[in-house]
């Protein structure tokens, strides 16, 4: 099963991705982890990316595609993968499609986890983290124990302003992937509202 996972920040992709990779025995490939691993391993693409970053430049799509190809060529991805965080734009999606065709591969599905913007804001702005244990709580959905409540912190990227900025970026840059993958016949829409178990059930159903 070769899949791409897209959806707005705070939609619950991380929770669902962890469940999917276990269920289908495939690796979860996030661009952040992939970058760090490629740079650390000193792969050709990792070296090219490090050179860009050391100069303060953005890493080009061609390098990112190269790292994706390096990663999915590894043994643990031979039966599939869950790609998260890439592609983010239609040009990246087109480049990924071309690279997969060149490698004799194709995608099975593109999962779109749908959650309304206001619920995303409510989820993110209510988060609080424990600096001592690293635990994450939510003031409404997962309240902290009384004994730790006073030491919890509200991260700067969990403010409403930061959240709406990230949502704006998602809608302008990543949301155009939806019609692109619909035209490819790959898009699977999933309602991301509700308990995690219910959302997982919906995903498994649409994947068949």
Image (cartoon, rainbow, N blue to C red):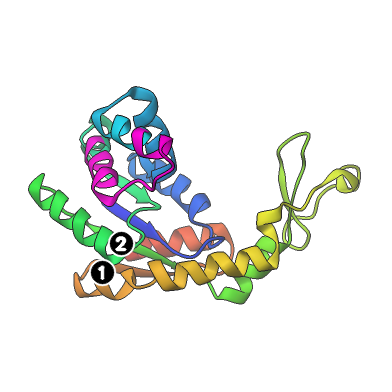
Residue range corresponding to the magenta coloring: 51-70
- From what the image shows, is residue 166 above or below residue 145? below
Gap between marks 1 and 2, in whole Å? Answer: 7 Å
Q: Quadrant of the C terminus?
A: bottom left
Name the residue located 32 percent from the left edge and 40 percent from the top edge. 26
The residue under the point 27% across, 58% down is 92
Count of number-bearing discs:
2
Residue tagged by mark 1? 181
> Where does the image place residue 141, in percent across and percent down from the top left?
72, 61
Between 163 and 206, the residue placed more toward the observer is 163
Element marked by disc 1? helix
Q: Are marks 1 and 2 in contact (CB under 8 Å)?
A: yes
Q: Residue 145, which numbered label?
A: none
Instruction: Name the image quarter holding residue 120.
Output: bottom right
- Quarter holding residue 122: bottom right
Label 2 CA crowd tier, 10 Å (few <14, some 14–19, many 20+): many
Judge depth for marks 1 and 2 and give the one in front.
Answer: 1
Foreground of the two, 50 or 92: 50
Q: On the rendered structure, is 159 left or right of 203?
A: right
Which residue was labeled with disc 2?
A: 110
């Amino acid at each position: 099963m070769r899949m791409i996972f897209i959806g707005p920040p705070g939609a619950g992709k991380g929770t669902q991705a962890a469940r999917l990779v276990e269920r289908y025995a495939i690796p979860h490939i996030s661009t952040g982890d992939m970058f760090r691993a490629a740079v650390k391993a000193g792969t050709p693409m990792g070296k090219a990316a490090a050179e860009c970053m050391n100069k303060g430049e953005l890493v080009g799509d061609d390098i990112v595609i190269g790292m994706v190809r390096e990663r999915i060529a590894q043994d643990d991805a031979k039966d599939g993968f869950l790609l998260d965080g890439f592609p983010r734009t239609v040009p990246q999606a087109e480049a990924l499609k071309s690279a997969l065709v060149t490698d004799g591969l194709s995608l099975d599905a593109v999962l779109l986890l749908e959650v309304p913007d206001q619920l995303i804001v409510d989820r993110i702005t209510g988060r609080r983290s424990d600096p001592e244990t690293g635990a994450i709580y939510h003031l409404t959905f997962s309240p902290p124990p009384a004994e730790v409540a006073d030491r919890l912190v509200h991260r700067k990227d969990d403010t409403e302003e930061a959240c709406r900025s990230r949502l704006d970026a998602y809608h302008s840059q990543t949301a155009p992937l939806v019609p692109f993958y619909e035209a490819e016949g790959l898009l699977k829409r999933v309602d991301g509202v509700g308990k995690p178990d219910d959302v997982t059930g919906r995903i498994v159903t649409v994947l068949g």
